[in-house]
Image: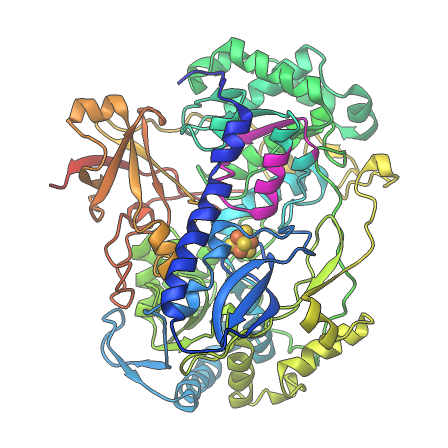
């Protein structure tokens, strides 16, 4: 692999996973859907605006219905997120409705947990069982002993029910298993996090730096479109990644950094920018705090110091640092999203924030813009009861900078009973077996529960461990709460049913409301149905549900985005400045300026296990979607070509991965390639399903989650670094 990439940019734009993948799924969709839709009819079509739920980006879409059945889904041209183009997963999203494996009716456990033996019951029986167990837990342990794990906007109403019941314990893996360290690192530096969608101004960047962030495989729609636009406009792309990703293939400079040494690279980049006085001195002087201390600390972190750590030559470190400085402030060092790697992740993210601060990109065009949202009031519910005990996940503020609840903290309390017992789990739309590290700990924690409930569309692995499984309608069959997110322009968007649910599935709002009624909490649901709820909220903003039903979304006036537009710089940190030196970190016993520690090297004969995303799947949620499965049915393990040659491995051979604790994966095809370093292997996350109910995805590919038996906890915020596992490769025959 060469450090400098000369492949034509235009060609890359054409071959980028985004366009090609979308076309492939669309073509597959059309063929399969034609087959599915072979029913007599008049060809009558209608179009229903809604927003996508295949990932959390929530692109606005137009669902096309022909002869009463789902036909296709396209981007809503009025949508600032999708700009009228869905990503490949979104295009294939309608396959979720046709998934032959989806849950159809409420299920009650018949045998031991995990045996996946069920009795079909009515909704009344299922919710009656859940409410009865919740009341017993409340009477014996207090309401705080029930926790909710939730992912996405669909969890809104279950959160409401749980808070009305009296528990503060609600967590999402998106914090401690994903973006948490990034947000904390930026909050510690600028006083504000990055948010979702990220406030990155990629489209206007003249230099984009990606550190392990594989945009183009990771399909965050707006970002990928802006990435393509930036390249088209001639932006310089710098990618540091142990794997030659799709993004790396578009880069001017590719840095195959040794896994776990990104912080050393960041410190060396900052050393060059400071010692060569390439930083934005006016910006730093005006807005920075502790710069002298910071620059003194950096003095030893030279490119020569970083070379043996990172494997990146001093010349390339200097050249790329100068390139970043040349384009400032329109140089965006991307903060990434899935940032839980090695346990030092909040400090690494803080280093990314500090590098951006040196370049003056926070609040500047081509850097980070200031997001805004529509002013839509919430529903005027009665006040929740005050929990007698605080949240269980972070006792004594063990992780002092955790700004959201820690899923693994709830799991620990469930295992140990400390600081108080957790006896009930409600799990909404998150497959905790794949989303949290150490499946063994998760399963052991579940054994301590008096109640385990899963609400999902498909029989995920976590559903197999439930006492009660509640089948949810897909996003194409239900209303959800309004999408009123922070973005570069304000908007409010509606998800609405396009077609009815085919069986006995119910929308989450109905499930949450019925459960509340059975718990005697009906007063917390003064609205009869969700249309009444939505209309009430929209009226408060001077809008109407009927209008949103026909348009899908309403946009507000475009606000100023940057300091240069007149936004007054404000940094809600303790000093009111950008904190190059963090006194709050020092006071809590942490390094006030990020300090690098060398990661453990892979033991002889093993490779560091890395994982990431593919353009056609979301987490472990989509492998049974027939359209997306057609596009990618199983994952591969990327193995360096020299390693493959040494082992006599060829691409397509089946292997198994054995981790340091003796856990052996399902068999998985090898992809023998020069596009990955020799000290690591790489899997796309979400495959290797073991749920018997996922008949079409069962046993296809290998699960990174199964092999992640160890994790390094971030001492600042409790995130779980998962790139600390090593695997050996064994021939599978
Ligand atoms: S990025 Fe793709 S999957 Fe995610 S919401 Fe948008 S279209 Fe759907």
Instruction: Examine the rendering and report whether any part of residue 617 can be seen.
Output: no
In the rendered image, the vertical position of residue 630 relative to residue 141, given as above or below: above
Residue drawn at 61 percent across, 39 percent down: 185
Total number of numbered discs in the rendering:
0
Q: Which residues are magenta?
A: 204-229
User: Closest to the observer: 610 or 35?
Assistant: 35
Image quarter in which the C terminus is found: top left
Image quarter in which the N terminus is found: top left
In the rendered image, the vertical position of residue 46 relative to residue 403, given as above or below: below
Is residue 512 magenta-colored?
A: no
Question: Residue 682 at what x, y percent from top left?
Answer: 34, 36
Query: For the view shown, which residue lies furthest in the front direction?
Result: 42
134 relative position to 690: left or right: right
Question: Residue 271 at what x, y percent from top left?
Answer: 62, 16
In the rendered image, the vertical position of residue 41 relative to residue 266, given as above or below: below
Question: Residue 165 at what x, y percent from top left?
Answer: 56, 79
Question: Residue 331 at what x, y percent from top left?
Answer: 67, 27
User: Closest to the observer: 279 or 397?
Assistant: 279
Instruction: Examine the rendering and report whether any part of residue 724 can be seen.
Output: yes
Residue drawn at 34 percent across, 77 percent down: 467
Question: In the image, ligand 1 is in what quadrant?
Answer: bottom right
In the rendered image, the vertical position of residue 703 relative to residue 354, given as above or below: below
What kind of colouring is applied to the model shown?
A: rainbow
Is residue 219 magenta-colored?
A: yes
382 relative position to 169: left or right: right
Residue drawn at 57 percent across, 41 percent down: 224
């Amino acid at each position: 692999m060469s450090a400098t990439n000369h492949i034509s940019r235009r060609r890359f734009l054409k071959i980028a996973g985004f366009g090609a993948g979308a076309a492939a799924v669309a073509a597959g969709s059309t063929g399969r859907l034609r087959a599915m839709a072979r029913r007599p009819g008049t060809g009558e079509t209608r179009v229903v605006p809604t927003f996508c739920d295949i990932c959390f980006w929530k692109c606005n879409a137009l669902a096309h219905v022909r002869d009463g059945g789902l036909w296709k889904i396209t981007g809503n041209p009025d949508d600032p997120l999708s700009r009228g183009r869905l990503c490949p997963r979104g295009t294939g999203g309608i396959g979720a409705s046709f998934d032959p494996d989806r849950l159809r009716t409420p299920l009650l456990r018949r045998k031991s947990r995990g045996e996946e033996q069920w009795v079909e019951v009515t909704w009344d029986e299922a919710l009656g069982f859940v409410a009865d167990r919740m009341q017993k837990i409340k009477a014996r342990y207090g309401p705080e002993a029930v926790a909710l794990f939730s992912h996405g906007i669909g969890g809104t109403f279950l959160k409401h029910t749980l808070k009305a019941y009296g528990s503060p314990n609600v967590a999402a893996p998106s914090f401690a298993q994903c973006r948490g360290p990034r947000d904390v690192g930026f909050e510690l530096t600028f006083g504000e996090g990055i948010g979702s969608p990220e406030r990155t101004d990629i489209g206007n960047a003249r230099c984009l730096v990606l550190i392990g962030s594989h945009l183009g495989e990771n399909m965050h729609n707006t970002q990928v479109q802006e990435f393509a636009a930036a390249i088209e406009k001639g932006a310089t792309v710098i990618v540091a990644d142990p794997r030659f990703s799709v993004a790396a293939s578009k880069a001017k400079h590719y840095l195959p950094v040794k896994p776990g040494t990104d912080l050393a690279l960041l410190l060396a980049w900052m050393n060059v920018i400071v010692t060569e006085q390439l930083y934005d001195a006016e910006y730093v002087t005006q807005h920075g705090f502790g710069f002298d201390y910071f620059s003194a600390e950096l003095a030893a972190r030279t490119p020569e110091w970083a070379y043996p750590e990172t494997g990146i030559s001093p010349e390339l470190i200097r050249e790329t640092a100068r390139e970043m400085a040349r384009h400032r402030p329109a140089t965006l060092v991307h903060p990434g999203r899935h940032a839980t790697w090695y346990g030092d992740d909040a400090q690494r993210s803080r280093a990314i924030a500090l590098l951006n601060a040196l370049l003056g990109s926070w609040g500047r065009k081509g850097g980070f813009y200031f997001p805004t949202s529509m002013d839509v009031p919430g529903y005027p519910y009665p006040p929740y009861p005050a929990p007698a005990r605080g949240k269980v996940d972070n006792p004594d503020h063990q992780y002092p900078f955790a700004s959201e609840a820690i899923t693994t903290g709830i799991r620990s309390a469930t295992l140990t009973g400390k600081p108080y017992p957790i006896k009930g789990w409600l799990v909404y739309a998150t497959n905790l077996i794949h989303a949290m590290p150490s499946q063994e700990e998760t399963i052991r924690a579940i054994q301590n529960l008096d109640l385990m409930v899963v609400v999902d569309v498909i029989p995920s692995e976590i559903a197999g461990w439930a006492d009660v499984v509640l089948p949810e309608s897909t996003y194409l069959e239900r209303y959800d709460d309004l999408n009123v997110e922070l973005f570069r322009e304000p908007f409010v968007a509606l998800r609405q049913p396009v077609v009815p649910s085919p069986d006995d599935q119910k929308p989450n709002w109905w499930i949450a409301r019925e459960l509340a009624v059975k718990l005697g909490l009906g007063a917390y649901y003064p609205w009869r149905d969700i249309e009444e709820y939505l209309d009430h909220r929209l009226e408060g903003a001077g809008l109407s549900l009927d209008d949103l039903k026909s348009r899908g979304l309403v946009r507000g006036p475009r606000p100023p985005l940057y300091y240069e537009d007149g936004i007054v710089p404000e940094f809600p940190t303790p000093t009111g400045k950008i904190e190059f030196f963090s006194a709050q970190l020092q006071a809590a016993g942490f390094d006030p300026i990020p300090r690098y520690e060398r990661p453990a090297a892979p033991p002889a004969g093993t490779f560091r296990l890395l994982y990431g995303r593919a353009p056609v799947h979301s987490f472990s949620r989509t492998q049974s979607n027939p359209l997306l499965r057609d596009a990618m049915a199983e994952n591969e393990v990327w193995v360096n070509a020299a390693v493959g040659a040494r082992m006599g491995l060829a691409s397509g051979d089946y292997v198994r991965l054995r981790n340091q604790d003796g856990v052996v994966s399902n068999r998985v095809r090898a992809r023998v390639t020069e596009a990955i370093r020799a000290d690591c292997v790489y899997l796309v996350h979400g495959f290797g399903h073991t749920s018997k109910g996922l008949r079409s995805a069962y046993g296809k590919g290998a699960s990174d989650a199964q092999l992640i038996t160890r994790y390094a906890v971030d001492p600042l915020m409790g995130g779980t670094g998962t790139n600390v596992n090593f695997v050996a490769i064994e021939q599978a025959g």
